[in-house]
Amino acid sequence: MNIPKASVGLPAYNGRPLEVAEEADGPRVCLPTVRNFARHIYRSAGYESEDVLTESANTDLLHLEPGKQFALRARLLWNMKLLEKDVSRGLAYVNPGLRPARVTKDYDLFMFVCPVHMDVLNFNVIRGWKKRCKTSVCWIHELWAANLPRYKHWLFRLREFDHVILSFKDSVEAVSDAIGRRCHHVPGGVDALRFCPYPNSPARVINVYSIGRRLKGPHQALLKWASDDGIFYVHDTFGNPGATLASDYLTHRNAYANMAKRSQLFMVAPGSVDLTNLTRGQVEVGFRYFEGAAAGAVLVGQSPNCEAFQRSFDWPDSVVEINPDGSDAVEVLTALLADQNKVAGISRRNATEALLRHDWVYRWKEIFAIAGIKPTRAMEARERRLKALAALVGEELFI
């Protein structure tokens, strides 16, 4: 299915129009997606990344759809104990309950995006992709190294792809050893154009914004602060980050971005920080860091103690640290909010760095390079738009 390529322009600034994206061009890409039915909140960032690729390259979406037995089969396959005991490895080839799909055109790239590890099995229902696609890439956003022994009866299927990419840096070596093939690291990202509050910055009426997983201590401290002193603390009120969306993913991402752009402070913590039985000491950079920074909010919480964070967020005050137990949260944040010049400076720096380094188009350019494919003109045009907007944000420092 070919979907129209968006030509999204940015508003003029000081009389100078910002560049409008070119029509997508270049190599043909086949991109399977489950967006029509898999509406978990955690998948929305992945769909956003797919949209940027679709707008920036000659991409056809291959919509996967649930079959009659989807609920039963998905429940069985997501039962890790069942997969762990499958010494025959037969379940690694089972249809996870989706309708069969077929690649009917020739493509330069088969791009398979998996927000979570179990999505890998979805490619069992796709026929013809090996014959019709010159190169194949599987990009897994979340895969924890400590769990690899549990995945040994299906992980070998990754060998069928020409390239395997992981967003978790400290899983790359372990997965490479497990499948006998060198894997690559490409970090998470954000649609920096959607999240950027400039040049027409809205009022930051939210004092503190928290979304997704969180540490109990800081959350309790912020709840009490909001109750005692009336700060505006916006946070999730449901307990399951894997909940399904009440609306489509795009409505969710726009609402999320609009809230973040109106927030002074944005709470962050390492990926799956409250699931120590899953992470087993592995520290990774969650997508919230990219999203909060792109919105020009001050990131507050904990800096992940890992190479990936030090490389991606290497500017001053990229995160304002508070204790994980929240014991100093009110003191630190009160002092921070009292210094609005500092808050404004951090805001501009965060937004600028996100525009220059963390938009999804930079990730797609990395993946294209790994696959041996040249970036498209539309990718280069989007990058120019990002850099132009970053320059305008920098000018605001002197206005």
Image: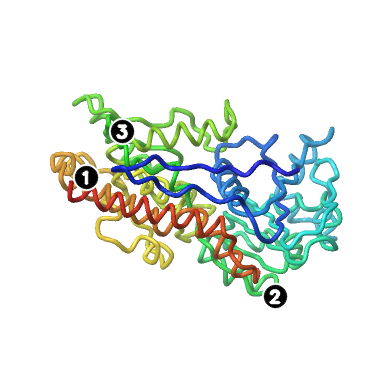
Residue placed at 81% from the left, 59% from the top?
106
Name the residue beneath numbered marker 1. Answer: 344
- Picture coordinates of residue 238, whole percent (x, y): 48, 29
For the residues marked 2 and 1, what is the alpha-carbon distance in whole angstroms? Answer: 48 Å
Q: For mark 2, give the secondary structure.
A: loop
Comes first in the chain, label 2 or label 1: 2
| Callout 3 amino acid | Pro
**From the viewer's perspective, is 299 left or right of 5?**
left
Name the residue beneath numbered marker 2. Answer: 180
Comes first in the chain, label 3 or label 1: 3
For the residues marked 3 and 1, what is the alpha-carbon distance in whole angstroms? Answer: 13 Å
Name the residue beneath numbered marker 3. Answer: 202
Residue furthest front in the image: 15
| Callout 1 amino acid | Ala
Residue placed at 69% from the left, 59% from the top?
151
- Picture coordinates of residue 313, whole percent (x, y): 35, 60
Q: Quadrant of residue 370?
A: bottom right
